[in-house]
């Protein structure tokens, strides 16, 4: 990097020796729009005062979502966890035979044994009480995760909660909201409490095995104490379950192999798309991580060019792409990557609106779906109007608003390509393609401004007419 010409050359000459990662971090610290920890965006809810400015929108949207989509079907994932918790309390195996109807219908417990012990106290509660408490805790985990990831604007948790992928996760009683909370805690503790941050990353990776690549985050960012803590935590939790549990390592791996063969073709994963293209399922589940591996190698080789939050965000997305099974509720973790890199409210609103194209809440009537999509659309319009008014000119201009969030145009282009493919490609490819396009869009937003390709794409998106 050469010094600028002119009299200012001496002033900037010293910057040539500063690592680009440090410059990126300095840029993030000075730019409120990019720094998720120092947001100074205008108050969209000036008519509310104090804590009500934060609580009222969240409570209102949560109540509407609960009225529309709660109790439409049992929270199947939560029931699986509760049944596993009861099993370990009774001293029996929480794992079902791979030939049982429970396993074949996708309602079997397949997590490491320690997850069953975490839910053992929940299993002691009456079922209805456990369901209500877990739903409330999940909403709280989403809100807390947003705050811990640095996003303190009142409407950010609302935008995430109104996303169709988040609603599906709440309906099913998944643990994805708690994974997001754990990511936020690890992010917050990364410098002051590195051991705790490592333990949390290890816990997340052991709880959802496809997230084990997150252990690379402290290693890439040279937080070696965190890396050791994460590795030891994951190995201890998984290993203890294999040593003292009812199934050994070989049986557990074989069970996961059967699970993959049963569910890959029905999921949204990269392996599912490869399978639809004619690759055998066992080969597809091995090829997908191999396709992601060069990206991880590039991330390691050019790690000095990425800020900490970019590294974590990219590893989250790489984990989603490499996972042999990808369900719509997993995309809440992709939203966590957006929160990390300080994506603006308009981009988050667009992501929420696009989620209703990807998936709709389970067994919901067309009227309920229309109301939910209208809520997400209204939030997008509110953010679009607010972004357009954030300029000196009193006249609102939609193109000005989109230039203010240039990444929304890039995301729109990628979603448009995915939608075109959805219309033209065979039915087997229609489910994974839009989801993979959404992950690619989030990846582009996460990369900015660290790669030449992302920089060019974003410059194209933000170019001014004429």
Image: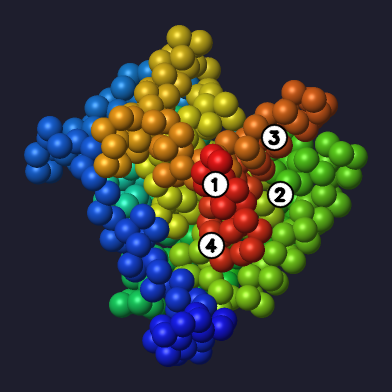
Classify 186 as above or below 21.
above
Q: Residue at x 9, y 43 (%)?
A: 50
Which residue matches tag 3?
Answer: 417
State the image coordinates of residue 342 (x, y, percent, origin top left). Answer: 40, 54
Q: CA distance from mark 2 to mark 3?
A: 23 Å
Residue beneath the point at 89% across and 44% down: 279
Q: Residue at x 54, y 46 (%)?
A: 463
- Report the quarter where the C terminus lies: top right
Q: Nearer the viewer, mark 3 or mark 4?
A: 4
| Label 2: few (<14), some (14–19) or many (≥20) C-alpha neighbours in 10 Å | many
Residue 328 location, quadrant: top right
Residue 463, numbered circle: 1
Q: In the image, is residue 332 above or below residue 381?
A: below
In this orientation, does residue 224 appear?
A: no
> Of helix, strand and loop, which one carries label 3?
helix
Looking at the rendered structure, which numbered label has been put on residue 324? 2
Tag 4 residue = 449
Left or right relative to 293: residue 70: left
Mark 2–mark 3 contact, CB under 8 Å?
A: no
Q: Are marks 1 and 2 in contact (CB under 8 Å)?
A: no
> Does residue 313 appear in the picture of this structure?
yes
CB under 8 Å between discs 4 and 2? no
Whichever of labels 4 and 2 marks the residue nearer the N terminus, that label is 2
Instruction: Name the residue: 50% across, 80% down.
Output: 4
Dot 1: what SS?
loop
Q: Residues within 10 Å of mark 1 (few under 14, many from 20)?
A: few
């Amino acid at each position: 990097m050469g010094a600028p010409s002119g009299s200012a050359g001496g002033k900037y000459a010293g910057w040539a020796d500063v690592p680009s990662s440090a410059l990126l971090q300095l840029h993030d610290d000075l730019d409120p729009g990019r720094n998720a920890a120092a947001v100074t965006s205008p108050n969209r809810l000036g008519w509310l005062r104090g804590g009500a400015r934060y609580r009222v929108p969240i409570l209102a949207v949560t109540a509407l979502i609960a009225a529309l989509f709660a109790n439409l079907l049992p929270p199947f994932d939560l029931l699986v966890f509760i049944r596993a918790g009861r099993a370990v309390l009774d001293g029996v195996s929480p794992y079902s035979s791979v030939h049982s109807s429970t396993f074949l219908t996708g309602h079997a417990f397949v997590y490491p044994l320690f997850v069953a012990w975490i839910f053992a106290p929940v299993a002691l509660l009456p079922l209805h009480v456990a369901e209500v408490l877990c739903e409330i805790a999940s909403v709280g985990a989403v809100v807390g995760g947003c705050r811990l990831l640095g996003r303190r604007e009142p409407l950010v948790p609302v935008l995430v909660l109104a996303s169709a992928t988040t609603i599906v996760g709440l309906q099913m009683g998944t643990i994805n909201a708690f994974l997001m909370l754990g990511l936020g805690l690890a992010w917050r503790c990364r410098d002051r409490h590195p051991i705790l941050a490592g333990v949390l990353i290890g816990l997340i990776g052991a709880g959802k095995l496809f997230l084990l690549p997150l252990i690379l985050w402290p290693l890439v960012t040279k937080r070696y104490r965190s890396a050791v803590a994460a590795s030891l935590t994951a190995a201890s939790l998984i290993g203890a379950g294999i040593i003292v549990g009812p199934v050994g390592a070989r049986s557990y791996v074989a069970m996961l192999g059967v699970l993959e063969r049963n569910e890959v073709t029905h999921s949204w994963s990269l392996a599912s798309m490869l399978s639809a293209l004619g690759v055998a399922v066992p080969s597809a589940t091995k090829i997908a991580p191999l396709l992601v591996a060069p990206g991880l190698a590039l991330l390691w080789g050019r790690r000095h060019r990425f800020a900490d939050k970019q590294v974590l965000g990219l590893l989250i997305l790489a984990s989603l792409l490499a996972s042999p099974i990808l369900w719509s509720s997993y995309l809440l973790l992709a939203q966590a990557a957006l929160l990390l890199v300080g994506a603006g409210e308009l981009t988050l609103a667009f992501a929420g609106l696009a989620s209703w194209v990807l998936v709709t809440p389970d067994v919901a009537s067309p009227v309920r779906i229309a109301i939910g999509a209208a809520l997400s659309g209204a939030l997008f319009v509110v953010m679009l109007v607010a972004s357009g008014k954030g300029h000196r000119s009193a006249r609102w201009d939609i193109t000005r608003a989109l230039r203010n969030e240039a990444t929304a145009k890039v995301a729109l282009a990628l979603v448009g390509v995915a939608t075109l493919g959805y219309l033209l490609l065979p039915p087997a490819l229609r489910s994974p393609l839009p989801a993979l396009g959404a992950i690619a869009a989030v990846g582009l937003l996460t990369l900015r401004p660290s790669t030449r390709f992302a920089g060019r794409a974003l410059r194209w998106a933000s170019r001014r007419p004429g």
